Amino acid sequence: MSVRITGDMLALDRKLVRRINRHADTLTQSAPDQQLDLKVRIAEEFDQLRGHRVRCELVANLSAKRQIVVREAQKKPEAAIDTAFAGLKTKVRRMRIRSLGEAGAADAMRATGT
């Protein structure tokens, strides 16, 4: 897995970089058979309704030419990173189940002779 971190000054914070790498390692361990290329973008933004927030955007390119994009905005950067990776983990798991289901359905069709 390759991890590329971009963004404003928050992307240079070592504590946040360690947190991102730790989440990326746990994601790799949960799906060892999938090759992921991960791009993480961290930016601070101002919303007139909610004030200052930190946006974390994850773009995961999977080996089967599929792409998953997760965006999350929270008050604290740690919370934004944690919730974005939680959403990415759920989406990767769903995509993996869906691809296994498609392969299983193809095998079932062959097994019944139809």
Image (cartoon, grey):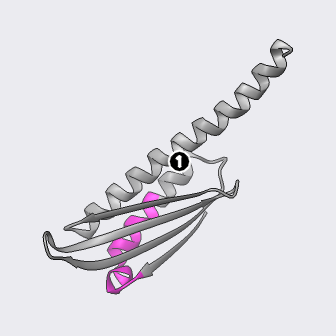
- Give residue 12's quadrant in the image: bottom left
Left or right, 112 with reference to 50? right
Q: Residues within 10 Å of mark 1 (few under 14, many from 20)?
A: many
Residue 71 x/y as whole percent: 38, 63
User: Residue at left 58%, top 36%?
Assistant: 97
- Residue picked out by circle 1: 92
In the image, residue 10 sits, relative to residue 113, either above or below, namely: below
Outermost residue, top direction? 112
Q: Amino acid at mark 1?
A: Val
User: Residue at left 84%, top 21%?
Assistant: 110
Left or right, 69 with reference to 64? left
For the N terminus, the image quarter is bottom right
Residue 66 x/y as whole percent: 63, 56
- Give residue 81's quadrant in the image: bottom left
Residue 90 x/y as whole percent: 45, 45
* Front one among 52 and 13: 52
Outermost residue, right direction? 113
Asked whether residue 4 is drawn in magenta, I would say no
Q: How many marks?
A: 1
What predominant SS class does the magenta segment belong to?
Answer: helix
* Front one among 79 and 30: 79
Outermost residue, bottom direction? 9
Residue 80 x/y as whole percent: 30, 63
- Give residue 48's quadrant in the image: bottom left
For the C terminus, the image quarter is top right
Residues drawn in magenta: 7-23
User: Residue at left 81%, top 13%?
Assistant: 112
In the image, residue 71 sits, relative to residue 9, either above or below, namely: above
Asked whether residue 11 is drawn in magenta, I would say yes
User: Residue at left 56%, top 53%?
Assistant: 28
In the image, residue 12 sits, relative to residue 103, either above or below, namely: below
